[in-house]
Image (tube, grey):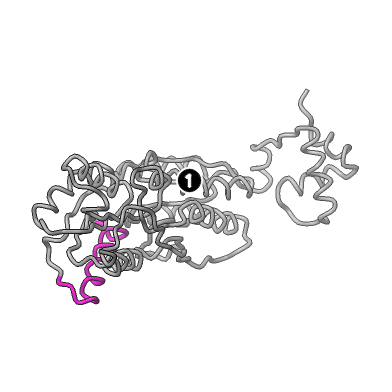
Amino acid sequence: MNPTIKDVAKYANVSIATVSRIVNGLPGYTEDTKKKVQEAIEALGYQPNAIARGLINKRTQTIGVLFPEVSGMLSSEVLEGVENAAHDGGFSVIVCNTTSSGKRTVKYLRLLQEKRVDGIIFASENVKEEYYKIFQEMQVPVVLVSTASQFNLPFVRVDDYEGAFRATEYLIQKGHKQIGMIGGSFEDPIAGVPRMKGFQDALEKHGLDFTDQQMTSNEGYRFQNGKESLPLLLDKLPLMTAVFAASDEMAIGAMAAAHQLGIRVPEELSIIGYDNLKIAEMCYPALTTVSQPLKEMGQSAGEILVKLIKGKEKEAESRYMPFTIVERQSVRDLRKK
């Protein structure tokens, strides 16, 4: 027979009302009492009834998370952080894969509205006006992660312009002057445009000419995009000694293309990526890259959302997370010739 709230109260030697307040995150008890109740819950294996809890605190204890591509390596790391924060706050997570489709995103938002989720984390995609109108209808807190918006919504992200600028500058400081970029989309204001602009500005700051011939654009940031882009870039820049790729998957795709073309990395072509996915240290040669703290970004966004839902914060400030360049073996220092 499953233990009841009455059993927990008896085990902890407190009232049923006290157990109820602790389980539902309401005030009115000491830390010692809370500890005793938590120990009783663990000892008895008590599982609070989610429906009953929702009737008390008017919450479903669920958070909706929307990704444009759940299967992507970046999404999985961000999601791990979000789930950690949600679990610590007593929430479950509903994950939605929008595939960057506006109609699908709207459909999922309506579904989350029907499910009466307590808050939303919106990741890696531009917030369209139709999405924002649904957010307002739902009247729940929304936190963005790895993206930003023209609307007044808190976000957790890395400065993509600055990250791309530093990656390009890193190559220049290693003695490279003929540098190309495998970029994202000119229609992507979140990561595409800022990273391409950072690349261009870094070249110009260091007195290197920039032309459109030094860059390819892509609709996605996947392995195949990088693999297909490198030969195109080499046709335009036959003397190129280094490539900055706008994602690690693109960078590893470029490495695969280089191998097929008989070009040695980094001896003949240096490559730097962006993200620091787990696969970056598994490939050969291991990839030098701009490290985004993806798991920490997800966790931070989740913690902000939980605080907003519980009323511990009325408003949340956006956060730029720090990035670093992780040096591995895919970039050659030309100054050591």
Q: Is residue 263 magenta?
A: no
Q: Judging from the image, what secondary structure is the residue with disc 1 in?
A: helix
Furthest toward the top, the residue is 1
Q: Quadrant of residue 170?
A: bottom left
Q: In terms of depth relative to the viewer, which is nearer, 279 or 18?
A: 279
Q: Main secondary structure of the magenta part?
A: helix
The residue type indicated by label 1 comes to: Leu
Q: How many marks?
A: 1
Q: Look at the picture and state if 268 lies above or below 50.
A: below
Give x and y (percent) for residue 162.
Answer: 35, 68
Q: Nearer the viewer, residue 313 or 215?
A: 215
Can residue 102 be seen here?
no
Q: Nearer the viewer, residue 214 or 6?
A: 214
Pick the residue in front: 9 or 205: 205
In the drawing, does residue 276 fall left or right of residue 91? left
Quadrant of the image containing the N terminus: top right
Q: Look at 49% across and 40% down and name the residue there.
A: 94
Residue furthest to the right in view is 13
Q: Position of residue 77 (x, y in %)?
A: 46, 46
Rendered residue at 53%/65% (across/down): 316
Q: Which residue is mark 1?
A: 79
In this rendering, position of residue 50 left or right of residue 94: right
Measuring from the top left, give residue 53's x and y in whole percent.
68, 42
Residues in magenta, as a range: 188-209
**Could you tell me residue 184's position as x and y percent?**
24, 54
Q: Is residue 86 visible?
A: yes
Which residue shows up at 40% across the image and 61% down it? 325
Q: How many C-alpha atoms fall within 10 Å of the one at disc 1: few (<14), some, or many (≥20)? A: many
Is residue 200 in the magenta section? Answer: yes
